[in-house]
Amino acid sequence: MKLYKYDNNRCNISGNKIKELREQAGMSQEQLAAKLQLDGMNLNQKAISRIETGDRVIPDYELLFFSRIFHVPVSILLDEENFSKS
């Protein structure tokens, strides 16, 4: 499958906001991965890193897990302003 990257060479819009929320919560990438695994989504630290740098696509169902962990609506993760902050 061909992955298309946007002007800022990212595969996702949400990575910047996920990183911001993780840092605000005082969590490491490893801690976030552990919380997601406990919630039923099997991601490791490397996947979190790739999401945050924009190197990994985030399927819509994964956004639901992130929104639950951070207690924010999915629309916060999809904020277009986050996409332009590369």
Image (cartoon, rainbow, N blue to C red):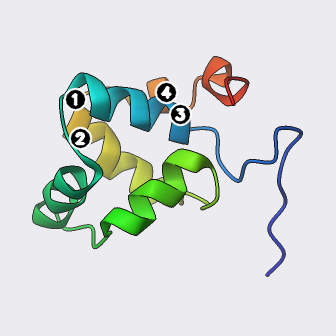
Q: Considering the image in quadrants, where does the C terminus appear?
A: top right
Label 3 element class: helix
Residue of label 3: 16
Residue of label 2: 68
The three-letter amino acid code for the residue at tag 2 is Arg
Q: Is residue 41 above or below residue 77?
A: below
Q: Considering the image in quadrants, where does the N terminus appear?
A: bottom right
Q: In front here: 75 or 15?
A: 15
Of badges 2 and 3, nearer the viewer stands 3
The three-letter amino acid code for the residue at tag 1 is His
The three-letter amino acid code for the residue at tag 4 is Ser
Q: Residue at x 42, y 48 (%)?
A: 63
Q: Residue at x 53, y 59 (%)?
A: 50
Q: Is residue 24 above or below residue 12?
A: above
User: Between disc 2 and disc 3, whose residue precedes?
Assistant: 3
The three-letter amino acid code for the residue at tag 3 is Asn
User: Tag on residue 71?
Assistant: 1
User: Cα distance, mark 2 to mark 3?
Assistant: 17 Å
Residue of label 4: 75
Q: Position of residue 33 (x, y in %)?
A: 24, 59
Callout 2–callout 1 Cβ contact below 8 Å: yes
Q: Position of residue 32 (x, y in %)?
A: 22, 50
Callout 4–callout 1 Cβ contact below 8 Å: no
Residue 74 seen in the current view: no
Callout 2–callout 3 Cβ contact below 8 Å: no
User: Tag on residue 40?
Assistant: none
